[in-house]
Image: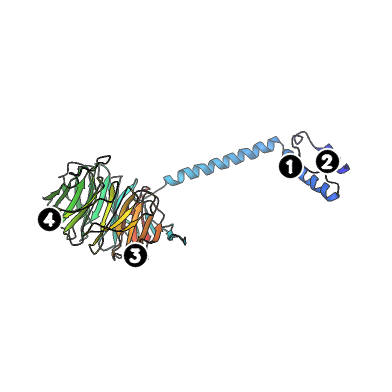
Amino acid sequence: MDEFQHIEQERTEEDSEVQLTDLPLLSNAGGKRSLWLARLLLGWPGSLGQRHWRQIGAMATLLLTVLAVLVILSPLHRGPAPSTVHPGIFSNPFLATYRSSPVLIYRGHFSEVRSVTWSPDGTRIASGGEDGTVQVWNAATGERTLTYQLYAGSLHSVTWSPDGTRIAFTSQDNSVQVWDATTGKHLLTYRGHAGSVVPMAWSPDGKRIASGSSDGIVEVWDAATGQHLMTYRGHAQSVLPAPDSPRSVLSIAWSPDGKHIASGSRDRTVQVWDAATGKGILIYRYHFVAVFAVAWSPDGKHIASGGRDRVVRVWDVSTGGDTLTYEDHAEIVWAVAWSPNGKFIASGSSDGTVQVWNATTGKRILTYLSSAFCVAWSPDGKRIASGGEDGSVKVWQVV
């Protein structure tokens, strides 16, 4: 025990507070050396002295402060220039293939992106959002080619004309505006609605535009002159109870042949009606909350619809019967879009994902990790554009 006593005598006042407890009494030399080493390790901080520790603490605090400032300021440095990234891919054998990174990110907006649309030739993308701007940019490089500023409020829907020469958008000022997609020259303003205009869609021949409003009315009008052609009041006459302006029309889509229009509403229905006469043909009632998205299949036989119930339903237009229910989203489904070949559907949600799945089987094929208020397929079916709450437009690779 001489060695142990010798160590005890050399301990200073500063390390007298450090005590070893619950150590077994060791009788051999190896045990003594272990005990000596343990005491030495526990007692080493005291040997540095309080002054040295204060200096080390001050340096550590300064370093942490600098790192915190860099972290806070880094998101504030954001310009309109796009960034091209290499997509990260990883697989989950029970679900699907995930892509964590888009092939291109466009950050020209300063708030939520509510609508995104490809030009018919696939070379440009137009996007609109809460910042009151429509921005047109090169789909390959992300270079901005045109900005249209609206001062009346946020934009709800942006759509390219079928011939690629014009862009139309809706806004909170109860209007639909049409302008030249190359020069940005204003061509037409339609103000036939009594409430805020949310969705709009061009007819396949580009001659008419259908637009829906918070008053439950859908108007059809001449895209060249602004002349009113027809009013559909099916949602305005709905008696289904629902909160927050229960009759608002939230989504519109023309059939591929231009003969019918489907409109989804906060009244919980999707209604299909004749585009020439306004006569109702079918009311789909299987969503139990607001319907935010409707889209026709390329062959015109089915409609995909999604909404607040977190479900995408695919149903037969001729019968109104369900053919598929897709339930893999965890939050509101804001957007649905068919692939150009009709084999797949992309759906965007506030659950942080854009999902691509088989339109016949419902099997999920791809998941893109990004919250989305809008999704759109490129005309060649190889890419998907999405816009979300972070103010960016992302382009994802499909094949």
Circle on res. 382: 3
Q: Residue at x 74, y 39 (%)?
A: 47
Q: Specify the amino acid type for callout 4.
A: Ala
Earlier residue among tags 1 and 2: 2
**In the structure shown, which secondary structural element does the residue marked by tag 2 occupy?**
helix
Amino acid type at mark 2: Ile
Q: State the separation of the CA atoms marked 1 and 2.
A: 13 Å
- Which numbered dot is residue 42? 1
The earlier-in-sequence mark between 4 and 2 is 2
Q: Residue at the location (47% across, 43% down)?
A: 72
Gap in angstroms between the C-alphas marked 4 and 3: 34 Å
- The percent coordinates of residue 380 (x first, y second) are 30, 65
| Label 4 vs label 3, nearer the camera | 4
Q: Amino acid at mark 3?
A: Lys
- 237 or 189, nearer to the observer: 237
Pointer 4 or 3: first along the chain: 4
Q: Are marks 1 and 2 in contact (CB under 8 Å)?
A: no
| Dots 1, 3 in contact, CB < 8 A | no
Q: Residues within 10 Å of mark 1 (few under 14, many from 20)?
A: few
Quadrant position of the C terminus in the picture = bottom left
Question: Of marks 1 and 3, which one's residue comes earlier in the chain?
Answer: 1
Q: x, y (%) of residue 343?
A: 31, 65
> Could you tell me which secondary element the residue under label 1 belongs to?
helix
**Which of the two discs, 3 and 2, labels the residue nearer the N terminus?**
2
Residue at far top of view: 13
